[in-house]
Image (spheres, coloured by chain):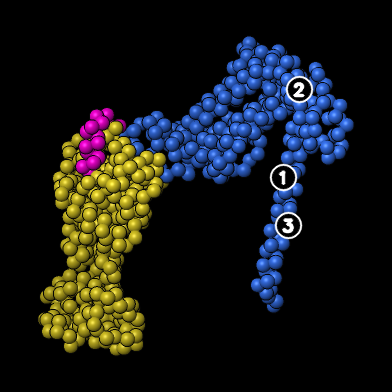
Amino acid sequence: MAELILDKVSKIFGNNRVISDFNLKVADGEFVVLVGPSGCGKSTILRMIAGLEPLSAGEIYINGELVNDVPPKDRDIAMVFQNYSLYPHMTVFDNMAFSLKMRKINRPQIAERVHRTAETLGLTDLLASPSRALSGGQQQRVALGRAIVRDPQLFLFDEPLSNLDAGLRLDMRAELIRLHKSLAATMIYVTHDQTEAMSMSDRLVVIKDGLIMQIGRPLEIYNKPANLFVAGFIGSPPMNFISCEVIRQGQDIQLCRDDFRLTLKAADFPALGSYADRNRQVIIGLRPEDFIVAGKPDSEVDNLQKIDVVVEYTEPLGSEILATCQLAGLPMTIRLAPDYRVIPGQELALLIKIDAIKLFDPQTGGAL
Amino acid sequence: MRFSTPGQGLCWKYCSLVASYVVLALLALFYLAPVVFMMASSFKADHRVLSEGSSMLAFFPADGSWQNYLDVWHRVNFDRIMFNSVFITGCIVTGGILINSMAGYALARLQWRGREVVLVLVLALLVIPFEAIAVPLFYQMIIIGWRDSYQVQILPFVSDAFSIYLFYNFFVGMPKELEEAARIDGAGPFRTFFLIIIPNAKPVFASVAILTFLMRWGSYLWPLLVTTGETYRPLPVAMAAFENQVKLWGDIMAFGVMMVAPILLFFLLCQKWFVKGVAATGTGRKF
């Protein structure tokens, strides 16, 4: 187990600055997920922690020790790669034993540790199999085993589940959560899959273009996104955005776009006053679950506002129905109960949960 | 628009198949004919080689006598010449795959100043024919005093631009994560190369070994320049000298078979690797 600190870490490739002043502190035993779109620099950060990529600026500390110039083998880390990177010419046993052999651990101890790890991961029957003969899921387990067997201070995962099919991914996700609980190890996990990120992490780090957009607990980020990017990136289906005029009407503030009107109490949204005074626009963010069909039992809750939409198409997913509707000329995705009968072209009266709406500045993208 | 019936399609398929086989068989005959002629003639008396040369009998070993082979064995120090060829070729192949693979790996994978320049130089060397540098190299060897030796036939050929290029090409395509995993596991560059890279690069090693063997086994110009007697002479030069001495076609053909047999055997044994290697390196270059 280890504490990890990244202090003003930057990475420049040629003239391209991919990471800028990246600061992160990971506590002992914490599971932190770095999430962001492809090319945002999250894998580069992981590779710098591993020592596979030199830093252009900044410092990395593992357990208080500056490791900028420490080679990967001496950082006491283990890394699981996206494509597993098992040694194809070796058996499962040899793959798992390789790092221990490199550390000149004696044979009986190697065998004992490999067998113990294999048992934990259900790999005992595969120990003699050549690694190239394994399925994707089995290879991923071996890759995990290869990391665990070393008993490292820090685990690094570089999109380890992205090559697996949906079912296996779910299983492995559960396996990793279990593993983190049982090992109580510090883990840094990189993914572009926000569902994976939300479900596994103690803390999420949302990254865009090498910059941290927000750090926080998954639900905190989901419910209080710091900016438009985080709001749009975290959540599936993504948040709906409506750009609106802000008009003051006595004690109220009205957000308008075409025939869409949303009336808010100015006292509840003090930040909107200056937007109304300066005639500036705001962006409303509404998650698909922030809508309730009028007349349903949920609609009895307080602080709702009614709007009318036309359903364009629906996606029944079994556990829910996703309906895409037109609102003020924009497509909106709303989440409906699985038993709700709705057909394309149907008019729907929806209630918006006023307490759930998020407001963003269109220029800075920041949350209000 | 006209459509062919299923019957017509099938007929066309068979006809094209037969035509392909005929063309391939003719090509095979074309390439095999000299080898069969050489083998058949090696079992014939000298006068029959010449008299039957213009008929189909040229391809049939009428006598079935091993006399020509015994003659060659008695006339030249064949085991010494064979040893020279095996030793020289063996050293070049062994040293070559080691040196060139390491050079290819360093160019493909390691980060060092001047890597791009060296790579361009290696690629530039590919287009320079050996004949162009044979004379200055020969002069250099005379100065060093290496004429009539093994090292003069081995050392200039251990490092080879084409072999480096083949290795480079293969290593560039290998997943980088394999080495990175080894680095994290605690292996240094040499251990990574010998324990991880080489076992996963068998096809290119086989390919380079076979290509180098073929090229060096038949090498003629350089050994002719640098050897004066039988002591260090390899097979091709010895055969040319033998031809000048004896002028007996049956014996010359027997010598030819004795020279070609190991290479044929080697190819037949390594055919699988050869095909794999050529496919793996993505090249069809002939020597």
Indicate the chain coloured blue by its letter: B
CA neighbours of label 2 inside 10 A, class few (<14), some (14 to 19), many (20+): some
- The yellow-coloured chain is labelled A
Q: Are the numbered discs 1 and 2 placed on the same chain, yes or no? A: yes
Q: Is A279 rendered above or below residue A109? A: below
Is there a contact, CB below 8 Å, between mark 1 and mark 2?
A: no
What residue is rendered at 24% in x and 29% in y?
A106
Image side of residue A211 versus residue A266, left or right: right
**What residue did someone put label 2 on?**
B67
Which of these two is toward me, A158 or A334?
A158
User: Looking at the image, which residue is at 67% across and 63% down?
Assistant: B13
**Reading the chain from its start, which is encountered first: label 1 or label 2?**
1
Of residue A280 and residue B147, the one placed in the foreground of this image is B147
Query: For mark 3, what is the residue?
Result: B19
Give the residue type at disc 1: Ala
Q: Earlier in the sequence, mark 2 or mark 3?
A: 3
Is A7 placed above or below A275 here? above
For disc 3, the neighbor class at 10 Å (few under 14, some 14 to 19, many from 20) is few
Three-letter residue code for mark 2: Gln
Residue A224 sits in quarter: bottom left
Please state the chain letter of the residue tagged with numbered disc 2 in the rendered image.
B
Report the residue marked by disc 1.
B28
Magenta residues span A102-117
Query: For the residues marked 2 and 3, what is the alpha-carbon distance in whole angstroms?
Result: 42 Å
